[in-house]
Image (tube, rainbow, N blue to C red):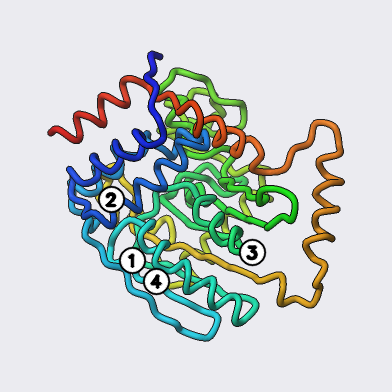
Amino acid sequence: MPKIDLTIVEVKALAVACLLANGCNDENAEAVAEIVTAAERDGCASHGLFRLPGYVAALRSGKVNGDASPSIERLAPGVLRIDGDGGFAPLALEQGRHPLIDATREQGVAAMSLIRIHHFAALWTEVEPLVEAGLCAMACTAYLPMVAPAGGREALFGTNPLAFGWPRKLGLPVIFDQASSVIARGEVMVAARDGHDLPPGVGLDVDGNPTIDPNEVLKGVMLPFGGYKGSSIAMMIELFASGLIGERFSFEAAEHDNKDGGPPRGGEFILAMDPNRFGDNAWLDHTEKFFEKMIAIEGVRLPGARRYANREKAQSVGVQVPEELHAKIVELIEV
């Protein structure tokens, strides 16, 4: 597939222009473009520019409020709620980040729920700023039903990603971001676009038969990682990101969604902890020993290491984007 070279600055400029041309105000366009650029920069093409047509579809259909103005409410000393005003999630997350950090430092533990948002991004971008502030944190969100519970053949769960981050004393933060499905939905879509087979075990076709054809999986159902273990984690995320905060479960999101290809309305749950408030003043040194022990094992790397390597490379030489995708985005700007 032919590709073109773009700098990180060009990636963001392209994303901003596309969003502004299709109904986002400056503030929302900037927030979404920042997340899109981070994904492209860190080698996560499935959540980078590839997502812009979906963002645009949701704006053009009127499902998403491109002028959203999120509001924040403190429900308890350690509980915050952000109302996203029907917009994309990034701006709501930006506006809630510092209040969450402050509440966590005050209370030791704090949680933030986001409601009336449309989430379409990689989760590590939301955890990383909290970890850089010295906190450990986790975030999760539901989506549309695409994944069957273990033992079933009917979709009930979203791909339901979970991100977790931990600060380090001597290195970059340890952060993982993983779907509770075998792979992310975006990776299946990219495989379908590029004509690649999937690894065995990713999903079933419409008749419930195992398949490695991404197009058949997109028409059928995805599977949770690790069977019942991944299924239980997906259920937990539905309860945190929907049941706990009063937002839509994945099946409810599907019932209300207009099926324009953009993200449905839903919620997100974030939990942050300040390690300095848990009584061990040597926690950084102690956990660093653990990480050193881990990476001393041959063949082992810490979560996020590959992403950081991609980031360093992209900052110096830029990224490669499929010509067809670039042309599509340019068309979305011009039409």
Crowding near the residue tagged with mark 2, few <14, some 14–19, many ≥20 C-alpha atoms within 10 Å: many
**Comparing labels 2 and 1, the label whose residue is closer to the camera:** 2
Kindly identify which residue carries mark 1.
84
Kindly identify which residue carries mark 3.
134
The CA distance from mark 2 to mark 4 is 19 Å
Amino acid carrying mark 2 in the image = Ala
Q: Position of residue 45 (x, y in %)?
A: 46, 33
Query: Dividing the image into 4 quarters, which one contains the C terminus?
Result: top left
Kindly identify which residue carries mark 2.
29
The CA distance from mark 1 to mark 3 is 26 Å
**First of labels 4, 3 by sequence position:** 4
Amino acid carrying mark 1 in the image = Gly
Q: Position of residue 76 (x, y in %)?
A: 50, 85
Q: Of 319 and 218, which appears nearest the observer?
A: 319
Query: Dividing the image into 4 quarters, which one contains the N terminus?
Result: top left
* Residue 87 placement, left or right of 61: right
Amino acid carrying mark 3 in the image = Gly
| Local SS, label 1 | strand
Kindly identify which residue carries mark 4.
82
Q: Of 140 and 324, which appears nearest the observer?
A: 324
The quarter holding residue 265 reads bottom left
**Comparing labels 3 and 2, the label whose residue is closer to the camera:** 3
Q: Position of residue 128 (x, y in %)?
A: 56, 54
Amino acid carrying mark 4 in the image = Ile
| Label 2–label 4 contact, CB within 8 A | no
| Local SS, label 2 | helix
**First of labels 2, 4 by sequence position:** 2
**Comparing labels 2 and 4, the label whose residue is closer to the camera:** 2
